[in-house]
Amino acid sequence: MSLDNAKILEKDQLEGFLEGLLKDNIVFGPTSKGDLLLFDRVESANGISLGRGNTMNSAKDVLFPQTERLFAYRHGEAGVEIDGPSAVKKGFILFGVRPCDARGLILLDKVFGEPLQDPYYGEKRARTVIISMACETPDPKCFCLAIGGGPCSAEGSDLLFLDLGDQYLVKAGSPKGMDLLKNTVFKKANKEVLARADVVEKEAEESMNQAGMGRVGIGETIEKRLEALFNDPIWDDITESCLGCGICTYLCPTCHCFDILDEAGQSAGERIRIWDSCQFPLFTHQASGVNPRPSVKERFRQRIMHKLCYLPQNGNLPGCVGCGRCVTECPVNLDIREVIQKISAREAE
Amino acid sequence: MENPYIPFLMRIEDVILETEDRKIKTFVLAFVNEEDRKSFVYVPGQFAEISVFGKGEAPFGMASTPTRPEYLEFSVSTIGVVTGALHNLGKGDIVGVRGPLGNGYPLETFQGKNLLLIGGGFGFSTLRSLTNYILHGPNRTAFGGVTVVYGARKPGLLLYRTDLEAWKERSDISLHLTVDQEADGWKGHVGLVPNVTRSIAPSPKNTFAVVCGPPVMMKYTLPVLKDLGFQDEDILFSLEMRMKCGIGKCGRCNMGSKYVCTDGPVFSQSELTRLTGEAHF
C-alpha cells in the first residue's frame, strides 16, 4: 500500500460524503429490512446500515436483477412493434460492498462482457462505481482468503474503506477510484496510518486462517482433480443430502444463469429475463425429453464443476468468492468448503 | 450498443406440412426489412432463435441454404409451447428472429474433401441446408464426392420430398434413404441409420463424416464410423442442448467448459473427447 492511492476519511465525514453521492447518483448499500440486512437502494445516508456483516443478497442484484425487462412488444396496425430498453442517465453507486462480492463482479464483468457485450449488464456497469467496505472481523462462514481473495482486498473495487476506529483508510482500486480520491473530503494519509491499517489487515487474515480452512489449492490443482473425479462415486456421497432447492445459486454473487420468457397480455407484452438455476431439473430438460442432468447428483456436480473447473478453464476467475452465503443458507447444511476438502482428500488417497 | 436480445421481424411466406403425422412443418420466412436480409449472413449448420411474441422463443437450425438468401426456412416439430404456437401460425403472420447463431459447418475445411452426411429425423434440417449449399451451381466443384444417408422411422416421416426427388436425379450425389421397417412401395434401404452406414461402407479417405440426428442415432453411428476407419477429427456432430440466449450468457447449454450455442453446435469428435462433462449423446 502506498500513500499515492490511499487517503483518510474521518468517520464524522462519512454522512456528508454519502449525501454528496446521493445528490447525483442512485445509491445502493446494506440496509435493514426487518431482521434482514439486504443490499438495496437507499434514499438517505442514514438508510445505510454498516457493521452488521454481509448482506443476504449481493451487489450482483443491482447489475443483474432477478427479473429484467429486455423489451416490450405490441401487436399494432403495422404488425409487431418492439420497444427496446429505455436509457437511464444517473450513475449507480454500490456502497458498502464486501470484497468477496466486489471480486464476484470481476467474474460477471467478463461473463457478460466477452466476447459479446450484454447490453443490459454493460450499460449499468459502465455508470457504476463500487465502494467497498473491508471485513476487519470476518464471519466464521467466510473463506475468501482460501479461494484467492482477501477480507481487506481492494480487487474489483473502485474504492475500499478500511475501518481504523475513528477514521477510514480509503484505498483506490482502480483509475475511477483514484479520481474519486481527489474529493476534498478525503485527507492525506501518513505512514503511521498505513502501519495501523497493515495491522488490521493482518489480524483479519489471521482470524480467517484460524477459523476456516486455510488456503485450499484451487486453480489448476482443483481443476485437474475435478476433471479426474467427474465420474467418481464421491459425488453420490457429496450430493446425497441435497434437496435441489437452488438457494445456493440464488444467493451466490457469481451465479449468472437466466431464463428468457414472455409475459403476455392481449395485444402487448414484455420479454423478460429471470434468474434460473442449474439445480432445477427443467434447466436442461430438452423438448425431446432428453435431460443430460437427470438427477440432483449431476446438477450439484455441474454447480461445482462450473465454478471451480469450467470457468477457470476458460480463463475466468473461479465462480466462488468465499462469501459463505450458500454455507449459511443451505437448508441441509451442505457446505461447499467441505465439498472442496473432500475433493482434495479424494485425490490424495 | 448492439442489442443481441432484440429480434428482427420476418413474415411467414409459406408453411409446408412435411410429415404424414402432421407434426413437422417447414416455415418459409421473408425478411420484413431489407437491411435485416443484408445483415443475415450465415453458413449451413448455424441456427436462429425464433420468437412467437407472447409465447417466447426457441432455437432452430436453418433448413434453408444461404445460396437462396431471400428466405429463411425452419422445420419445426410441434412439441412445446413455442413450437405449438408456431404451428398455429400461417401465411402473413409475423415472427421474430435472432441470429445467425453458432459456428455452423466448417465449409473452408470441407473444400476438396469428400463428405458423408448422416442424418436422422428432423435433425436432417441443417444437413439439407449443407447439401443444397454444396449442390448449388459452381459450389459443387469445390467439394469431392457427396454421400447422404438419411433415415426416418417410416417413409411418411421423411422431410423435404421435393429436394430428395431432385437429388435422386443428380449423378453428383449418392443418396441413401432408409426407414426402420419395410413399407408398401418403399424402394430405399430398410434399417437403422448406423447399420445402413455400415452396409454402404463409404471410404474414410479424404472424407469428413457429418452427423446430425437424435442422440441415440449419433451414439450408435460413432462406433460404425470408427470401425470404417474415420479419425476423430474427421467426424463432426451437430449437437443439441436446451438453450435460451444463444449467445453464451445464460449458462444453460454447456457441455463441460464449452457452450453448444457459441462453441458449437458443430463439434468434432476429437473436441468432444477432450471435454469433461455429461455425455452429449
Image (tube, coloured by chain):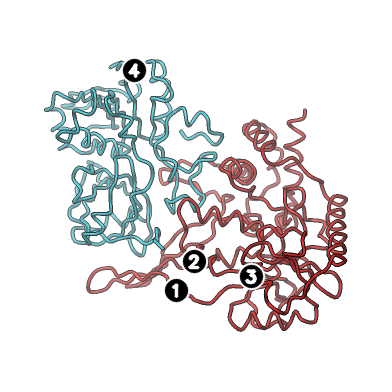
- The first of marks 2 and 1 along the sequence is 1
Instruction: Name the residue carrying label 3.
Output: A179
Is disc 4 placed on a helix, strand or loop? loop
Q: Are marks 4 and 2 on the same chain?
A: no
Q: Are marks 3 and 4 on the same chain?
A: no
- The first of marks 3 and 2 along the sequence is 2
Give the Cα separation between the discs numbered 3 and 2: 21 Å
Image quarter of residue B139: top left
**Count of numbered circles in the view:** 4
Instruction: Name the residue carrying label 1.
Output: A87
Residue B204: mark in rendering: 4
Residue A31, position as x, y percentages in the image: 70, 75
Residue A223 versus residue B200 in the image, above or below: below
Residue B245, position as x, y percentages in the image: 44, 54
User: Mark 3–mark 4 contact, CB under 8 Å?
Assistant: no
Instruction: Name the residue carrying label 2.
Output: A123
User: Residue at horizontal 21%, vertical 36%?
Assistant: B132
Is disc 1 placed on a helix, strand or loop? loop
Give the Cα separation between the discs numbered 3 and 4: 64 Å
